[in-house]
Image (cartoon, rainbow, N blue to C red):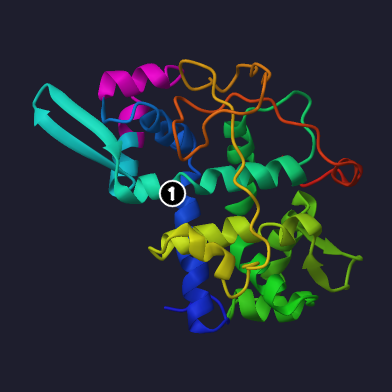
Amino acid sequence: MATTGLPSDADADIARVSEALAMITPRWNVRILLALSGSGHPLRYSEVADKVSWLQNGQLHPKLQALCEAGLVHRVEHTSRHVTYGHTDRGAALLPVLPLIVTWAEEHLEKADRPLPAIEQIEDSLTLLTRRHAAAILWVLKSRGQTGGRALAKTVMPGSDWTNVYPPLRQLVADGLVDTAGIGKPYRLSVAGDALGPVFGALSAWSAGQPLTQAARHPLWGRPDTTPAPKKWVSNQSRLLAPTATPAPSTNGQISSLTGQHRDLFSHATPARSGAALAAGGPRR
């Protein structure tokens, strides 16, 4: 069933990407997926719990269950007392999307008061992208350029009161993903919103079951003429960084990539952003 006024293929694309974001955005989900990625083999429940030790008793099991239901994690019951958890093929294929989110966040999110590990960059970015109607609004603005609020509403939420588009639009403006010259003026993607192309392209490819190499060929967000070299992320701790901890600064910035030997990610310090990004402030966290 159509959810926007866009052509059916674009509408289905938005729905798949929104569903993918909804799978990974809930609190701790990305950290749990990364905890499962470090050892190279399925982990017992106690081993997963040790890697995310800040979770209170009773919090981990429903999270693992939800990730299993989403098809990202598989649970194998060897015996009644021996159960292991690991990535499904779909879950493992999702991991290479995460460095793309970090790259976008480091360039476009506002500067934090302290250096942030990449896991927090991911979580901050996902919070922005999963706001209600965010993906659909960004999709329409990318495809149509400058658009007035009424026209945008007819496409993003057909059949609804057109004024309902303004709360999510105002939020996206506040978040720094959409720009406007003022009340009654057209809306357009900001530089940060337009730069989401690699992220949306990769999520689109993954959610459609395609290899991530197809991201650059996305009909709307793809940029086939620009293929940046993969970036490497530092991982130098024995367990996932706890949410309240301060990351240790990187010494050389060069060890295995997210899709290679990740040990337990992410603990690198965020590099300084460009002067333009700092001057603009960047999307809010």
Q: Is residue 146 above or below residue 49?
A: below
Could you say where residue 215 lies in the image, as x and y percent from the top left? 54, 63
Which portion, as a residue range, is magenta? Answer: 44-63
- Quadrant (top left/top right/bottom left/bottom right) for the C terminus: top right
Residue type indicated by callout 1: Leu
Q: Is residue 200 above or below residue 22?
A: below
Could you say where residue 80 lies in the image, as x and y percent from the top left? 8, 25
Between 201 and 30, the residue placed more toward the observer is 201
Between 202 and 234, the residue placed more toward the observer is 234
Image quarter for residue 146? bottom right
Judged left or right of residue 97, residue 135 is right
Rendered residue at 26%/24% (across/down): 45
Rendered residue at 36%/35% (across/down): 63
Rendered residue at 59%/24% (across/down): 267
| Residue under label 1 | 94
Judged left or right of residue 81, residue 1 is right
Secondary structure type for disc 1: helix
Q: Is residue 64 above or below residue 168?
A: above
Residue 45 falls within the magenta-colored stretch: yes
